[in-house]
Image: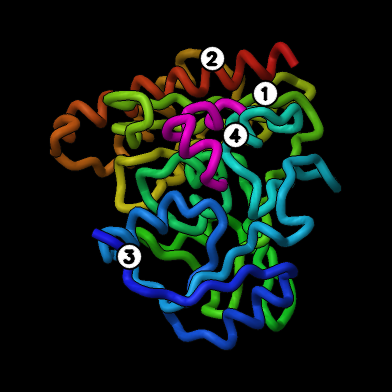
Amino acid sequence: MLPSRFDYVAAHSIEEALAAKAQGDEDTRFLAGGQSLLPMMKLRLAVPSKLIDINRIDGLGGVERRNGHLRIGAAARHADVAASDAAFGAVAAAAPWISDPLVRNLGTLCGSVAHCDPEGDWNSVLLATGADVVARGPGGERSIPIAEFVQDMFANSLASDEMVTEVRVPVPSGRSGGSYVKLERKIGDYATVAVAGHLELGDDGRIAAAGLALTSVAPINLKVAEAEALLVGNQPGPELFAEAAELAAAAADPRDDVRGTARWKRQVVRTFTGRALAAAADQALKG
């Protein structure tokens, strides 16, 4: 199928993009990489009346460390994140796992985050690392914690007149590590199960902060707060990670489908959580 007719605007500033959005109706959409939006348009699952192309806006690209954060602009491609020396931990680990080379070269991290697909990888990584989504609207700029941004399957907390301009991931001041462990049926497939892990160690070697999130085993990307609380204050090690893995498996709510049974997926969550935390701890201890 072909997309339905739509108007097209190539914005050259954020203000121009927001003005075009204000002049449109509720079906007006912003376009960066389009790797989620365009396939939906071809299937008529999305029928935007207007597309506002933000790729010509200066300052919306780039992956850099600034003011204690890893800043990823709305026009930065997945491949930009994968190639960046500024990326670290779970962000760096997840970037090469995003779909296939074509999607990584065209698609954007911010677009994937705003899409809120529970099978998407980035929101789990952002939940584990405590990231914020930055949005701009007529009222100015606001920073939204990722746990508040993800509302439901394919639903975020953006106001109708706002656009995502960047994502900010806090850069730990001490020793830290992160990992993203993903099971996929073939290269470029969505995750059957994936786990994002993030650990920060204090001067005494105990875990000072922890992040753990699951992909594809719940209606939304799932932050496992109970396991995170268990980890904090304890020495990293196999027994502790096994306890956290049990909590993660219990929190998961997978479904039987062509990729496997719910029981099997819960076991994968258990195994992958242990691996993700062990890899994060190893990276933190070496750093």
Looking at the rendered structure, the kind of residue marked 2 is Gly
> Are the residues flagged by discs 3 and 2 in contact, CB closer than 8 Å?
no
* Residue density around tag 1, few if under 14, some if 14–19, many if 20 or more, within 10 Å: some
Residue 100 in the magenta stretch? The answer is yes
Which label sits on residue 79? 4
Real-space CA distance between mark 3 and mark 2, rounded to the nearest whole angstrom:
52 Å
For mark 3, what is the residue? 3
**For this rendering, which residue is in front, 283 or 95?**
95
| Residue type at numbered disc 1 | Arg
Q: Position of residue 244 (x, y in %)?
A: 43, 29
Q: What SS does tag 1 mark?
A: loop
On screen, residue 139 versus residue 38, left or right, reads: right
- Callout 3: 10 Å neighbours few (<14), some, many (20+)? some
Question: Looking at the picture, does residue 51 appear above or below residue 58?
Answer: below
| Residue 128 can be seen in this image | no
Q: Name the N-terminal-most of marks 3 and 1.
A: 3
Looking at the rendered image, the disc whose residue lies closer to the viewer, 3 or 2, is 3
Compared with 138, 174 (above or below) is: above
Whichever of callouts 1 and 4 sits on the residue coming sooner in the sequence is 4
Task: Residue 61 in the image: state x and y as whole percent.
Answer: 71, 49
Task: Mark 1 and mark 4 in contact? Answer it, CB < 8 Å.
Answer: no
Measured in 3D between alpha carbons, the distance from the residue under mark 2 to the one under mark 4, in whole angstroms, is 33 Å
> Which residue is depicted at the point 56% across and 70% down?
52
